[in-house]
Amino acid sequence: MVAVQPIKSQSDYDALQTPSPHLQVLYFHAPWAEPCKQMSTVLEHLASTYEPDQQVSFHSVDAEELPEIAEEHDVEAVPFIALKKDSKIIDSISGGDAAKVRTVVEKHANPASDLRSAIPPQQTVTRPPPPEPKENPTVTNGIQAAATSAQSTSGAQPPAKNLSSYAPTSSDPPTAPAMSSAATNPSTQTQEDLNARLTDLVKAAPVMLFMKGTPSAPQCGFSRQLVSILRENNVRYGFFNILADDDVRQGLKTFSDWPTFPQLYMSGELVGGLDIVKEEIENDKAFFGEYRVSSGRNEGGPASAEAQKAPAVSA
């Protein structure tokens, strides 16, 4: 039977990146996430139902230990499962829905030949010939009855109207509500407007954290760790939940020339992500310097709404 194999390094992952029709099930987890404990049990049992010759393999990845792999698969929350064939993602499931995981894995694990054998042979259906039309019918449908009535009244059918040259006029009743460009394209924000907005956002507080989720409910382990670092260092900061605004999420990647989140800004300048912040602190214990609050009490955390310069950043 098949077992879930842990990927412990980038080289372990790279060894799997060879073109192959085999189905690879990548399971991203984090040790602190409670739903991952149940999902680990589910996947271990699911893997045990397959034999090695069924061309299905299961692999687990610690999303915090191997962040580059997690970012490559756009992992925003754990548990997260990616299904791959020929090194390409063919499906993914985010969350702890065990039934959905089983259904999706079984869908892609079954070879096409098995699916074809399960389909019954094509059935031949012989339709009866249509009834012969009756002469001088006395009972007709509504359309023919109306035409017959018109014939009996006028003695001949009225000529069909030629609509080939018809054009609507202002006196014609409307047939559908008019659609403005704003209705068909609700987002009218230009790139210039977005850049101006991002410029204001990164300066909304002396220390600004662009994260997945909120400090009280982070949606990824990297954001959670960076929030902890700011709190441990008594840093008062503003934050922005990039999951709530896709314009900011996508635009900030280009604006900052930094493709991943979280992102930390100080005095309007990009510091970087979690790894960069850790390195800066290791090299300089006073890295946050003037941005710290009272060192006598643990007062670090999100700044109050009044203390932040932009209402778009909540506390």
Image: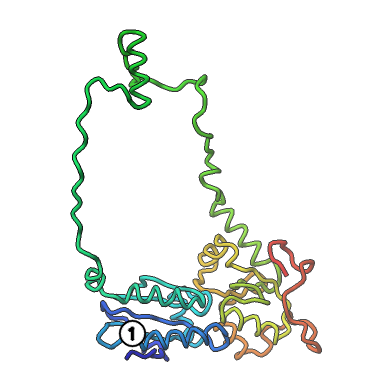
| Residue 168 in the image, given as x and y percentages of width and height | 45, 22
View extreme (front): residue: 138
| Residue 297 in the image, given as x and y percentages of width and height | 80, 87
- In which quadrant of the rendered image does the C terminus lie? bottom right
View extreme (top): residue: 154
- In which quadrant of the rendered image does the N terminus lie? bottom left
Res. 102 image quadrant? bottom left
Q: Amino acid at mark 1?
A: Ser
Task: Name the one closer to the observer, 5 or 272.
Answer: 5
The mark total stands at: 1
| Residue 112 in the image, given as x and y percentages of width and height | 24, 71
Residue drawn at point x = 35 percent, y = 86 percent? 49
| Residue 42 in the image, given as x and y percentages of width and height | 45, 84
Residue drawn at point x = 31 percent, y = 13 percent? 157
Residue that numbered label 1 is attached to: 57
Res. 13 image quadrant? bottom left
Question: Crowding at label 1, few (<14), some or many (≥20) Cα neighbours within 10 Å?
Answer: some
> Does residue 86 appear to the left or right of 283 in the view shown?
left
Residue drawn at point x = 46 percent, y = 79 percent? 70
> Does residue 280 appear to the left or right of 103 in the view shown?
right
Task: Name the one closer to the observer, 44 or 139.
Answer: 139
Task: Name the one closer to the observer, 53 or 67.
Answer: 53
Res. 255 image quadrant? bottom right
Protein image colouring: rainbow
Residue drawn at point x = 34 percent, y = 11 percent? 152
Tag 1 secondary structure: strand
